[in-house]
Amino acid sequence: MTGLRKERTRQSRELLLRAAAELFAEKGYHSTSLVDVADRSGVSRGSIPSHFGDKLGLLRAVVEQLHSDIAESMTTPLAPGAGGARGISHLGRTSIRRHTTKLFLALLHEASDPDSPIHTSFAQIHADMRDYLHAWLARPEISTELPPGVAPGDLACAIVGAIIGINQQWSLNPKAVNVAAAYDAFVRTLFNSLDWAGSDEAEPANA
């Protein structure tokens, strides 16, 4: 395969993935057809099997890309000196960005069924989020800031729940839910730190 052909193949795959992700977020997986994906992407429907095999293969590829995006967001370097409260605020603001929020929540419903083909993949996304937070919270310079008696693993689970829950409320009614304010309220309450002001340099929630 020539270099030009490889590049065209890569571009076609990216266009199909982007279109599928948008449509799954808007309509759900089951209500989206391959014709819809082809029309949205501008790529012929006949190209889909060569890239993904079938609709299920396309779904798995979308979930794989979503997993990669969330992992990249969570591992964004923190600002120097970011401690427990500020660090958790940063992670909460950046872990699920606006372009992935609705897709994540739309597919979460599908993945909740133990028989779903993406159940295991979504369970792994949650596990990776918890594991990353657990490892970060267990660092000596961070663990000393945690409330007494709070285990890093339990706190990691609670933080993941807060991130997903607040974003779910935002997706249902964006005008009624300020994700940044709600998440900062969670962190303030968690650390019982009334004088903590949050980081003005933190990236806005759902950016």
Image: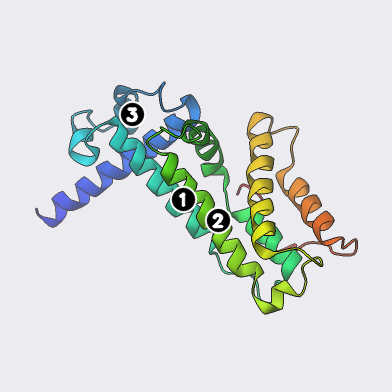
Q: Residue 136 or 66: which is nearer the viewer? A: 136
Residue occupying image coordinates x 49% and y 28%: 26
Q: Nearer the viewer, residue 4 or 74?
A: 74
Q: Position of residue 120 (x, y in %)?
A: 42, 44
Q: Residue furthest left?
A: 1
- Can residue 204 be seen in the rendering of this structure? no
In which quarter of the view is residue 148 placed?
A: bottom right
Q: Earlier in the sequence, mark 1 or mark 3?
A: 3
* Percent x, y of residue 25: 49, 32
Which residue is found at the position 42% from the left and 45% from the top? 121
Residue neighbourhood size for the residue with mark 3, other residues' Cα within 10 Å, grouped as few (<14), some (14–19), many (≥20):
many
Please tell me the numbered disc located at residue 37: 3
Q: Few, some or many C-alpha atoms within 10 Å of disc 2 (few <14, some 14-19, many ≥20)?
A: many
Q: Amino acid at mark 1?
A: Gln
Answer with left or right where residue 50 lies relative to residue 92: left
Q: Which mark is residue 129?
A: 2
CA–CA distance in space, label 1 to label 3: 26 Å
Is 129 positioned to the left or the right of 57 in the image?
A: right
Q: Earlier in the sequence, mark 3 or mark 2?
A: 3
Identify residue type, mark 3.
Answer: Val
SS at circle 3? helix
164 vs 158: above or below: above
Badge 2 element: helix
The disc at residue 124 is 1
